[in-house]
């Protein structure tokens, strides 16, 4: 039996991983073990502290169910989700940048025709949304499929209401032959991410707020182009600089113009990356 010192333990674990058949899994595990051990050495992690960490992860698992994914939320507030989005979605400068999907996307959103009101009864100030979908050469992306979803005036998504009977403030649309789209909705509002669980406790313990700046989610698909998952943020939102999940990119922030009648208009042109 070898005599374990703090560095020897790391080497032993690395040796034990030598026969991992999947080369990518091997690469990830080797790096993970080295960084985890280095982290523990650096902060001189005690047994009591690591037990607290394990209890935190256990609570994170226990609160997770089909509706709530606390581990993704943890990854979001640690910036890890956004880091993987940025690394995986490197595109030419002309392309619209990607950001996090978030937990409020659903597959079975209702279909709408261009010009329809996707609010479908959700409460908020009216907001007209319009724009275009193009490729990097400026070509129209005809009939691109658009999914949009957003919070209402209370900062809640339809799926957060226990008594909701229908989807609201979300829908699927198809752009016209010139790649243009327009629809009616409501003004999206800033909202706190779910913070009544372990992730909320972590935010509180680290003196962080749970708020996201107001945004409209878009998922855009078209044959021959990479799927774009992104948001459009509202200029001057108080939480732009401190988004709880680090999802803001400057190129995604724009003016949502207030009209004389108190309604809003948002214009945004998306540029897709070819596959
Ligand atoms: C969202 O924008 O819907 C979201 C993203 C990450 C965590 C929570 C919410
Ligand atoms: Fe959102």
Image (cartoon, grey):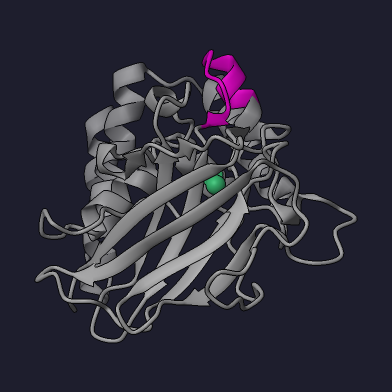
Q: Quadrant of the C terminus?
A: bottom left
Residue 61 horizontal/vertical position (percent): 66, 49
Q: 54 left or right of 197?
A: left
- Residue 220 visible here: yes
Residue 218 horizontal/vertical position (percent): 45, 60
Q: 244 left or right of 6?
A: right
Look at the picture and state if 20 lies above or below 1.
below
- The image quarter in which residue 113 lies: bottom right
- The image quarter in which residue 229 lies: bottom left
Residue 154 horizontal/vertical position (percent): 73, 36
Q: Which residues are magenta?
A: 201-212
Q: Quadrant of the N terminus?
A: top left
The verdict on residue 204 being magenta is yes
Q: Nearer the viewer, residue 229 or 89?
A: 229
- The image quarter in which residue 175 lies: bottom left
The verdict on residue 80 being magenta is no
Residue displayed at 48% across by 20% down: 46
Residue displayed at 60% across by 74% down: 107
Residue displayed at 17% across by 57% down: 90
Q: Nearer the viewer, residue 208 or 9?
A: 208
Q: 67 left or right of 32?
A: right
Q: 158 left or right of 150?
A: right
Q: Number of marks in the image?
A: 0
């Amino acid at each position: 039996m070898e005599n374990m010192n703090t560095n020897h333990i790391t080497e032993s674990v690395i040796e034990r991983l030598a026969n991992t058949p999947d080369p990518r899994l091997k690469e990830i595990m080797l790096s993970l073990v080295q960084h985890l051990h280095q982290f523990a050495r650096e902060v001189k992690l005690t047994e009591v502290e690591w037990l607290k960490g394990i209890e935190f992860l256990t609570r994170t698992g226990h609160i997770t169910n089909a509706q709530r994914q606390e581990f993704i939320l943890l990854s979001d507030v640690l910036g890890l989700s956004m880091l993987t989005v940025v690394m995986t979605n490197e595109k030419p400068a002309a392309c619209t940048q990607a950001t996090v999907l978030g937990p409020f996307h659903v597959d079975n959103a209702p279909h709408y025709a261009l010009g329809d009101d996707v609010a479908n009864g959700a409460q908020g100030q009216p907001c007209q949304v319009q724009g275009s979908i193009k490729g990097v050469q400026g070509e129209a992306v005809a009939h691109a499929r658009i999914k949009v979803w957003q919070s209402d005036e209370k900062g809640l998504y339809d799926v957060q209401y226990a008594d909701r009977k229908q989807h609201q403030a979300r829908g699927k649309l198809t752009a016209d032959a010139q790649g243009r789209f327009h629809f009616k909705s409501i003004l999206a509002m800033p909202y706190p991410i779910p913070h009544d669980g372990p992730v909320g406790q972590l935010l509180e313990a680290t003196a962080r707020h749970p708020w996201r700046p107001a945004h409209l989610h878009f998922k855009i698909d078209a044959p021959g182009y990479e799927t774009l998952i992104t948001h459009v943020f509202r200029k001057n939102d108080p939480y732009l600089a401190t988004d709880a999940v680090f999802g803001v990119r400057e190129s995604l922030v724009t003016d949502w113009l207030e009209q004389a009648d108190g309604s809003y208009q948002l214009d945004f042109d998306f540029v897709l990356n070819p596959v």
